[in-house]
Image (spheres, rainbow, N blue to C red):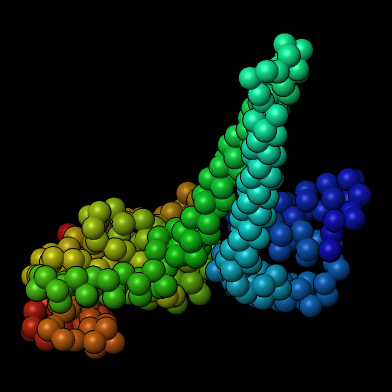
Amino acid sequence: MWENDSTDEAARLAGAAIARLGDLGLATTPRNFTLFYAYESGRDPSLRHALEAEIASGRLSADRALALYDRFFGIDHGHAKLHEACLAMQSTFGQVFGNLKEAGGHTARFGQALNTVSGVLTPDMSAEALSDLVRQIATATSNMQQQNQALADQLTEASGEIDILRQDLEDVRRESLTDALTGIANRKYFDIRLMECMEQAQESTKPLSLLIMDIDHFKMFNDRHGHLLGDQVLRLVARTITESVKGRDTAARYGGEEFVVLLPETRLSNGMTVAQQIRRAVAGKKVVRKVTGQELGTVTLSVGVAELKAGELPEEFIRRADSAMYEAKGNGRNRVVAEDSGLMVHAASG
C-alpha cells in the first residue's frame, strides 16, 4: 500500500506518525507506527475517520489503538505472522530436500564411475591404461568431495535458517499469549493454564486456589484522569501482582480492569494470605502523572478467593471466585473475601 512512497515522502510520514504518537502518549510500537503512518498518509478515509473520532473523544488508549490496528490490518495478526513463518519454513525444507536429492544423484554417478572402472580393471593392463583409470578415479573422488562439501555448507546454512524460524515461531506463540498493554499473560494463556492446573490438582489431590481481583472505581479514575493514565494504572497493577507471586504461580489479565492469579498447591487460607499481600502492595503504590510529577493518589483492589473442589468444572471454579470478588466490592471494596468460607480480610488501616 505504501511501498511506492518516495524516500522523502516516507521520511515525512514516518516523522509525522512518531510525533503524533508522542503527543498522544502512545508507545512507538510496530503496530502503533503502522496505524499512524497509514493515518498520516490519508489513503484510507475510514481509518482516518475512526482514529480522529477516538482522538477527539479523548478515549484513545493502547488497547483502543490495538483494536483499531486489528480492525484495519487483520484481526488475526498472530496467525498471519505464523503463516509467514510456516511459508519460510516450507521454503527452507524444500531447499534442504532438493540438496539431498541432488547429492543422491551425485553419489549414484560416483558409484557408476567406480563400477565402470572396476569393469575394465584387469591384471594384464598396461601402465598407461592403469594410470588413466587412476586419474578417472581421482577426478570422480575429487568431484564427490567438492559436492559433499557444498552439501555440508548448504545444510549448515539451512540449519541456521531453521533455528531463526524456530525462534520466530516461539515469538509468535509468546505474543499470542501475552497481554499487549500490561506485558503479563492474557486470558487465552490463563484458560490454558487453568485446565493444566486443574488436571494436575485432580490427579495429585493437591490443592489449587484462584484469585480474581478488580481495580476499585477504575471507570471513575479513567473519566477523571483519562485513558492514558488508566493504562498506566493497569500496567502498575500488573507489575505489582507479578512481583507478588512465585515462579509456579500464574498471573494474568482477565479482561478490562480484572486480573487473576492461579496458585497451585495452595490451600484457601494461604491463598487469602497471597491475596492480602497483593492488595496491600497495590494500595501502597502512588499513581503519578509522569509529565508533571503530580500525585494522583492510590488505587485499591477487591479480591475474591476460591479453592478448587473435587470434580468441579472450570466455569464453577471461576464463578465462585468471581462471586467472592463481588462480595468484597459490596462490603466496601479494598478487601479480600474467600467464597463459601465466611472469611473476610478487611483493609489495613495504615
Relative image position of residue 320 (x, y in whole percent): 21, 86
The image shows residue 348 at horizontal and vertical percentages of 15, 65
The part of the image, by quadrant, that contains residue 304 is bottom left
In the picture, measured across the screen, residue 178 lies left or right of residue 245, that is: right
Q: Is residue 122 visible?
A: yes
Q: Measured from the top left, where is residue 182 in percent x and y?
A: 45, 60
Residue at left offset 55%, top offset 69%: 63
Number of marks in the image?
Answer: 0
Point out residue 129 in the picture as x, y percentages from the top left corner: 75, 17
Q: Is residue 226 left or right of residue 207?
A: right
Q: Residue at x 36, y 56 (%)?
A: 239
Which quadrant of the rendered structure holds the N terminus?
bottom right
Taking the image as shown, residue 96 lies to the left or right of residue 300, namely right
Q: In the depicted view, which residue is nearer to us: 150 or 9?
A: 150
Q: Quadrant where the C terminus lies?
A: bottom left
Q: Residue furthest top?
A: 127
